[in-house]
Amino acid sequence: MMHLKWENNPTTKRIECVHANAKKFVVDNKLTPGKLYDVKNETEEFYFIFDDSNRIGGFRKDYFKVV
């Protein structure tokens, strides 16, 4: 269960939220456009970050740009 240790992982990169307009899911209460986030893990489609609720969450890469 690697995902239980992601909170302690070193930050791999910093990303900036570009938008929070999702078609299917509600992410506007978890992401703030213009805010910088630390990436704790990454897959081909998702970044895993500490979101605005201060918990690890997985979000599609199209919400962000690499700083």
Image: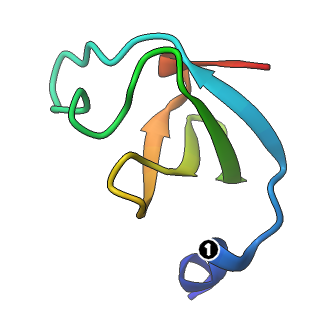
Question: Secondary structure under badge 1?
Answer: helix
Q: Quadrant of residue 45?
A: top right
Residue 28 is at least partly visible in this image: yes
Where is residue 6? Give x, y as percent: 64, 73
Q: Quadrant of residue 29?
A: top left
Where is residue 23? Give x, y as percent: 18, 16
Residue sitting nearer the eye, 36 or 59: 36
Where is residue 36? Give x, y as percent: 62, 30
Q: Does 64 sit above or below residue 36? A: above
Left/right of residue 21 with respect to residue 24 in the rendered view: right
Left/right of residue 7 with respect to residue 54 in the rendered view: right
User: Which residue is found at the position 82% from the left and 40% from the top?
Assistant: 13
Residue sitting nearer the eye, 14 or 2: 14
Q: Quadrant of the N terminus?
A: bottom right
The residue under label 1 is 7
User: Which residue is found at the position 47% from the left and 19% from the top?
Assistant: 63
User: Which residue is found at the position 24% from the left and 19% from the top?
Assistant: 22
Residue type at mark 1: give it.
Glu
Residue sitting nearer the eye, 35 or 40: 35
Residue 43 is at least partly visible in this image: no
**Mark 1 Cα-neighbour bin, 10 Å: few <14, some 14–19, many ≥20:** some
Q: Does 9 sit above or below residue 63? A: below
Where is residue 42? Give x, y as percent: 68, 48
